[in-house]
Amino acid sequence: PRWAWGFAGLAALAYLLVTGVQPSVLRATVMVVIYALGRMLLRRPDALNVIGASALVALAINPGDVAELGFQLSYLAVLGILLIAPVLRLR
């Protein structure tokens, strides 16, 4: 149901505040909130679009993150998982 996605987004935001807005948690929270908003609008968000939008939001908040290794590796890891998952599913 739509309310469950709203609850998921709010829970992610609450967790972000409890952890002290650390960069890695911020990245994950932005991804969850964007995906949840899409589902609440009765859409099926594309994972690559969610990741791209998340990166844009995170960089709008702190543009210096683009030079951080953690930022780069976290997005590359998620992209790698998304790209290899269909191949693994075929086996």
Image (cartoon, grey):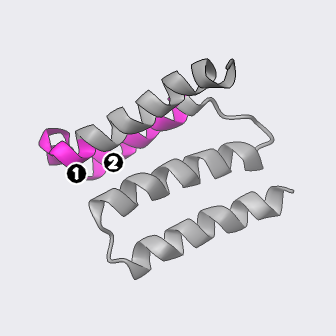
Separation (CA) of disc 2 from disc 1: 6 Å
Q: Is residue 40 left or right of residue 58?
A: right
Mark 2 and mark 1 residues within 8 Å of each other at the beta carbon: yes
Residue type at tag 2: Ala
Task: Residue 63 in the image: state x and y as whole percent.
Answer: 19, 44
The quadrant in which residue 41 appears is: top right
The magenta region covers: 48-71
Query: How many marks on residues?
Result: 2
Picture residue at 33% right of the left edge, 43% below the top:
74
Q: Quadrant of the N terminus?
A: bottom right
In magenta segment, residue 49: yes
Q: Main secondary structure of the magenta part?
A: helix
Q: Where does residue 47 sit, x and y in percent of width and height?
A: 57, 32
Whether residue 56 is visible here, answered yes or no, is: no
User: To which residue does mark 2 refer?
Assistant: 58
Which of the pair 18/56 is nearer the observer? 18
Look at the image and tell me in which quarter the C terminus lies. top right
The residue at the point 17 percent across, 43 percent down is 69
- Asked if residue 10 is positioned above or below residue 54 in the image, the reply reads below
Q: Which residue lies at the image location 42% right of the left edge and 81% below the top edge?
A: 18
Residue type beneath disc 1: Asn
| Numbered disc 2: secondary structure | helix
90, above or below 36, in the image: above
- Magenta segment: does it hold 39? no
- Judging by the rendered image, the residue that carries numbered circle 1 is 62
